[in-house]
Amino acid sequence: MKIEPKFRGFLCTAAHPVGCAENISEQINYVKSKGKFKGPKNVLVIGASAGYGLASRIVAAFGFGASTIGVSFEKEAVGKRTGTAGYYNTKAFDKFCNEEGIYTKSINGDAYSNEIKEKVIETIKDDLGKVDLIIYSLAAPRRTNPLTGETLSSVLKPIGESFKSKTVDFHTKEVKDVTIEPASEDEIRQTVGVMGGEDWNLWIEALKKADVLAEGVKTIAYSYVGPSITFPIYREGAIGMAKDNLEDTAKELTKKLQNINGEAYVSVNKALVTQASSAIPVVSLYISILYKIMKEKNIHEGCIEQIQRLFEDVLYGDNLKLDEKGRIRIDELEMREDVQNEVNNIWEKVNSQNIEELTDVEGFRKEFLKLFGFGLDNVDYDKDAEV
């Protein structure tokens, strides 16, 4: 059938299987263009179907020749309703790996559950023996705690007082004011429970107990800091409390992994268009401005470029430098003083009338659609596609 994008708020509820495969192919070709490097052999990616997690799996497999196990929670097609983009991304990734004889195993299910953890451990034991890199890249809005049975929900809210700013509807390109009420204490607690480090810790403890972690294992969780513009809603908000907890967890995990010379890090990455970031008010406008500036300065990177650099230069290169909080920073180009000064200058001026002139809001929209397999040059969207 012919597939077109459908929207519900900031969500796209349709995905194009051919477009998703083309998106994966483009990322694989970029990684291949960089050549092969020495690095991890057996990689587990938790949250592997989109964004930074998917890019990590692609770089590991096609840049380092690693065997990968990916965990994600996606839906296949039902009737005329397409599967999720992550479902098609994973199918395409597996297909490309199989064509080149690269081991891949994709496990679909709730990564927060004990059941999926046990399934992954059995797969590692049966197929790989041990893993030497674990990427933790989950960005789900809810989590059921396997220890208590409580289902927790995360919120994108400030702490202490209401936050007033502006944002953009990237479909209509309308700039509008937004007011976000502060999070309650319970909402903060639940957000930390979903987006903090508790589940990452449970994963590493389970893998260690099962003796499937290789000597010198590395584990990385992805995070974001961002500029002062987004601090109230992000770094100083409920989600920021969760990120602080994630960073504390990295230090705890490094101690737990000492006896096998393991290391745990948080990598602070650049702001990019992902399914998660498009849901955050204010951030969509900030990214639209940021994209224009970084593209003009020829320093723009997407997910795949960021992760290629993280793996090649930092994790398995000689540029592992940590900030004062012990974090890897590959957001340094975004946070350059000249870039942020220009962002702040445009932020003060931008409105619905000049947004296309002052920002790359159209680039934001195109990147968003690309996440779901739409708008790629080599895909004929007039053709029927098998969902």
Image: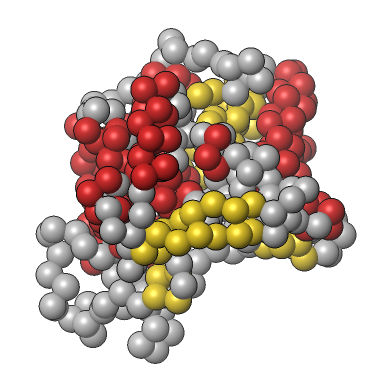
Question: Looking at the image, which is closer to me, 340 or 105?
Answer: 340
Question: Looking at the image, which is closer to me, 288 or 150?
Answer: 288
Question: Looking at the image, which is closer to me, 16 or 228?
Answer: 228
- Left or right relative to 353: residue 311: right
Q: Is residue 362 visible in the rendered structure shown here?
A: yes
Depicted 187 relative to depicted 9: above or below: above
Depicted 228 relative to depicted 91: above or below: above
Q: Tell me residue 98's x, y (percent).
A: 31, 52
Which quadrant holds the N terminus? Answer: bottom left
- Left or right relative to 102: residue 238: right
Which quadrant holds the C terminus? Answer: bottom left
Q: Give the residue displayed 76% in from the left and 21% down from the top.
A: 255
- Left or right relative to 199: residue 99: left
Q: Give the residue displayed 74% in from the left and 30% down from the top.
A: 248
Q: Give the residue displayed 74% in from the left and 18% down from the top.
A: 259
Depicted 155 relative to depicted 208: above or below: below
Q: Tell me residue 318's x, y (percent).
A: 43, 10
- Left or right relative to 217: residue 351: left
Q: Residue furthest top?
A: 318
Q: Give the residue displayed 42% in from the left and 35% down from the top.
A: 344
Q: Tell me residue 311's x, y (percent).
A: 42, 27
Question: Looking at the image, which is closer to me, 208 or 197?
Answer: 197
Q: Is residue 273 visible in the rendered structure shown here?
A: no
Depicted 10 relative to depicted 64: above or below: below
Q: Quadrant of residue 298?
A: top left
